[in-house]
């Protein structure tokens, strides 16, 4: 009898197993299935795996590690292609979901727990469902925005993302069916986790490289006891300096983006053309003596309008956005062969500032004046209120004065009422 029962149970087990969905790739319970993910992308759908990880990211079920990530960019991490419904995520209680489900914020809510020295650089983590990136097939992604930093050393940041089902789903409500199984289903509250690790740093430029594009998040590592030259863009700017045997790295991003506030305050009133040189963070150059900085010609000589460099004005921008005329501190040279090697306006400096070149003189004097606030207090009252530098103790006398005034008002009101009563008799 036992033998017959055992045979029956074994047959039932085989039949029940055969009836389960034969998913091509399913994750371990409670983690996001990353089996079909091999690359990460930017906003244009370009594969940036090689640039951020020196090859392919390190990926396994429930985790992905991205090495060599630049800050100040947006990264799309696939949750799986929407067209490949065989990449199934098994939820914490055995439910099943597709990538397109995990990316749908109507079906799943995400929470993010950030950690590591670079955690502040993870600005946001968002679900994106059925997204078309460039020429890629539509897919579901985690969209991660990274903030900017002037760091010259690698920072680690982790984001542990939990997907939690917002409502029940079964064969009667799911419109999706895996290519090799039954409809997706789960119960409200089921979860799946994905751990993301970033190693974040700006791109290193050494003294032997000597070139960086404008707008790139880079830091410069000088060659010890050597003359170092760094040129930005197509001769847009350059520095030349000598370093000692222990020269430190420094952040070296040059932004040439126009500043609309400066245009409105200074440029527009005199119809000026402005060109911007913002050495982000205004770094100090680790030179044995003052470095040579050249602001290169910012316009194309073949353009219809090209001002005479000798007639231009140069202004330095302070932290509050005010301009100071520093034209006299610069010297124009057509080649600067012995130093930076590019044509432009040159100055000796230890700190790379923020500069504006204008084809017209700007009125900056009115913004240097500080309007004194006027007081409504009479002059004699101001003289009487002399600050002795000592705190006046709270004796409670002012409170008693207030009480006395109120009592006097009540007494007068009572007297008036009595007088009115007598008068009416």
Image: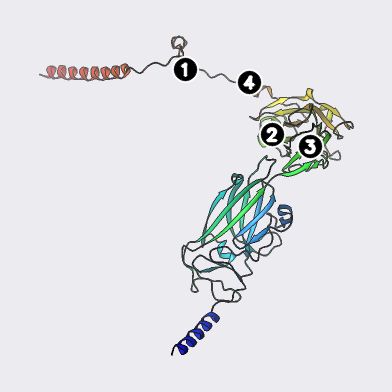
Distance, label 3 to label 4, CA atoms, is 41 Å
Q: Please report the residue visible at 65 percent of the width from the left and 22 percent of the height from the top.
A: 368
Q: Position of residue 280 (x, y in %)?
A: 70, 36
* SS under mark 1: loop
Q: Could you say which is closer to the camera, residue 43 or residue 4?
A: 4
Residue receiving disc 2:
263
Closer to the observer: label 2 or label 3? 3
Query: Dot 1, crowdedness within 10 Å: few (<14), some or many (≥20)?
Result: few
* SS under mark 3: loop
Name, please, the residue furthest toward the left: 425
Q: Which mark is residue 376?
A: 1
Q: Which mark is first along the chain, 2 or 4?
A: 2
Distance, label 2 to label 3, CA atoms, is 35 Å
What colour scheme does the image use?
Answer: rainbow
Quarter of the view holding residue 369: top right
Query: Dot 3, crowdedness within 10 Å: few (<14), some or many (≥20)?
Result: many
Determine whether label 3 and label 1 are within 8 Å by CB.
no
The quarter in which the N terminus is drawn is: bottom left
Distance, label 4 to label 2, CA atoms, is 19 Å
Residue receiving disc 4:
369
Q: Please report the residue visible at 52 percent of the width from the left and 61 percent of the height from the top.
A: 108
Distance, label 4 to label 1, CA atoms, is 22 Å
Q: Which mark is first along the chain, 1 or 4?
A: 4
Quarter of the view holding residue 232: top right
Residue receiving disc 3:
222
Q: Which mark is first along the chain, 4 or 3?
A: 3
Q: Position of residue 124 (x, y in %)?
A: 58, 50
């Amino acid at each position: 009898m036992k033998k017959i029962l055992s045979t029956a149970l074994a047959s039932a087990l085989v039949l029940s197993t055969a009836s389960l969905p034969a998913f091509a790739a399913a994750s371990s319970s409670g983690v996001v299935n990353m089996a079909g993910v091999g690359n990460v992308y930017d906003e244009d759908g370009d594969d940036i795996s090689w640039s951020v990880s020196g090859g392919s990211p390190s990926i396994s079920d429930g985790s992905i590690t991205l090495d060599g990530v630049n800050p100040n960019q947006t990264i799309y991490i696939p949750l799986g292609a929407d067209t490949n419904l065989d990449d199934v995520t098994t939820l914490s209680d055995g439910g099943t979901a597709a990538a397109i489900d995990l990316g749908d914020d109507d079906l799943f809510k995400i929470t993010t727990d950030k950690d590591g020295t670079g955690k502040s650089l993870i600005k946001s983590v968002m679900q994106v469902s059925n997204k078309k990136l460039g020429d890629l097939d539509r897919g579901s992604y985690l969209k991660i925005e990274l903030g900017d930093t002037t760091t010259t050393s690698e920072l680690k940041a982790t984001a542990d993302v939990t997907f939690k089902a917002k409502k029940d789903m079964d064969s009667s409500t799911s419109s999706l069916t895996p290519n090799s199984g039954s409809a997706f289903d789960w119960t409200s509250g089921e979860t799946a986790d994905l751990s993301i690790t970033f190693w974040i740093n700006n791109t290193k430029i050494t003294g032997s490289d000597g070139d960086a594009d404008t707008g790139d998040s880079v830091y410069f590592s000088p060659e010890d006891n050597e003359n170092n030259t760094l040129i930005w863009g197509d001769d847009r700017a350059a520095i030349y300096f000598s370093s000692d045997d222990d020269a430190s790295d420094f952040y070296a991003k040059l932004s040439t983006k126009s500043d609309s506030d400066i245009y409105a305050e200074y440029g527009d009133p005199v119809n000026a053309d402005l060109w911007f040189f913002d050495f982000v963070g205004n770094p100090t150059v680790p030179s044995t003596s003052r470095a040579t900085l050249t602001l290169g010609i910012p316009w194309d000589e073949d353009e219809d309008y090209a001002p005479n460099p000798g007639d231009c004005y140069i202004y330095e921008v302070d932290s509050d956005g005010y301009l100071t005329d520093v034209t006299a501190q610069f010297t124009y040279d057509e080649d600067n062969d012995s130093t930076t090697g590019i044509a432009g306006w040159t100055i000796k400096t230890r700190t790379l500032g923020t500069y504006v070149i204008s084809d017209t003189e700007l009125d900056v004097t009115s913004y240097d004046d500080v309007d004194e606030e006027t007081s409504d207090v009479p002059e004699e009252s101001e003289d009487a209120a002399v600050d002795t530098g000592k705190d006046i103790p709270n004796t409670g006398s002012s409170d008693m004065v207030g009480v006395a005034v109120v009592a006097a008002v009540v007494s007068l009101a009572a007297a008036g009422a009595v007088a009115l009563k007598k008068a009416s008799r």
